[in-house]
Image (cartoon, rainbow, N blue to C red):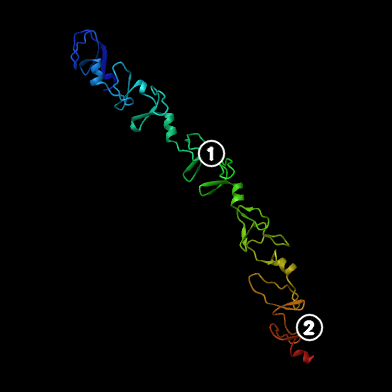
Amino acid sequence: GGPGSYTVGTMSERFDCHYCRDPLHGKKYVQKEGRHCCVKCFEKFCANTCMECKKPIGADSKELHFKNRYWHDNCFRCFKCYTSLVNEPFMLRENNKIWCSNCTAADEAPRCKGCFKPIIAGDQNVEYKKMVWHKDCFTCSQCKQVIGSGSFFPKGDEFFCVSCHEHKFAKTCAKCKNPITSGGLTYQEQPWHSECFICSNCKKQLGGKRFTAVEDQFYCVECYKECVAKKCAGCKNPITAGFGRGTSVVNYEDESWHDYCFKCTKCARGLANKRFVCHNGKIYCAECPKRL
């Protein structure tokens, strides 16, 4: 029974202790379930056992009970911080230990991966893949500065701020030598910023467009034809190549021709890969100079 199931008083009538038969007249006694007993026998046979100290809760002690469990009032303290929980909110946890609400909240709270202390309600935190940090504990693995809620890059078990990631891991543009943080393109296995891979003449970006390379310079189709390509001695148009289709070129002395423009001045026979003669600066097949 609970604390209300017995009464304590001083015997004024003649009764003997129910257990040891000592006379109780004029002595302190306890009455429980219709039986009178001395204080000593009450503690031995009737008293509840304290859940904390495992000792009997005597007739002179204040007793607290909860769900058929009993404590001395001075044993009713938080298992973690030892604060008295008499008239305070508490939790009954494993092994019949009582905890105050603050210690319960801290014990059940997730632990910061940085400082390993609990993250309690109201703390600013950062979560990533079932891991959690206090906001000020989420720092860059390289420079140790607080990342907090800013942008970051994970690498294995490490985390890097944008600046450190750029310098440590980002590819470097072949032209400007600065890190490429997003986008970019590759040409001949070298990375470029899109804004760095441009026509050397008109400065338009060449990403995704047809272009040709001349030594270390790049040209769009139009600029290559206009500024770079050799002019055909026959049709006077640019001789272009490198735009996805082959172009055969005939070179003779300091002049060049499209292969289909390299033909006899008189009979117009194609002379690419054939014998020809040059007379007064003009090209002829082997037969036509004889007819001039």
> Residue 80: x and y, percent?
41, 29
Between 242 and 41, the one lying in front of the other is 41
At label 1, the amino acid type is Cys
Between 243 and 125, the one lying in front of the other is 125
> Which residue is the site of mark 2?
282
Quadrant into which the C terminus falls:
bottom right
Viewed as shown, does residue 167 lie left or right of 94? right
Count neighbours of disc 1 (C-alpha within 10 A) and say few if under 14, some if 14 to 19, many if 20 or more.
many
> Residue 291: x and y, percent?
78, 92
Between 247 and 14, the one lying in front of the other is 14
At label 2, the amino acid type is Lys
Q: Quadrant of residue 97?
A: top left
Q: As drawn, which residue projects farthest toward the bottom? A: 291
Assign a secondary structure to mark 1: helix
Q: Which of labels 1 and 2 is toward the front? A: 1
> Residue 196: x and y, percent?
67, 57
- The residue sitting at 36% across, 21% down in the picture is 74
From the viewer's perspective, is residue 185 above or below residue 230?
Answer: above
> Which residue is the site of mark 1?
137
Q: Quadrant of residue 44?
A: top left
Task: Compare marks 1 and 2 and give the one earlier in the sequence.
Answer: 1
Count neighbours of disc 2 (C-alpha within 10 A) and say few if under 14, some if 14 to 19, many if 20 or more.
few
Quadrant into which the N terminus falls:
top left
Assign a secondary structure to mark 2: strand
Q: Quadrant of residue 175?
A: bottom right
Viewed as shown, does residue 53 lie left or right of 199? left
From the viewer's perspective, is residue 213 above or below residue 65?
Answer: below
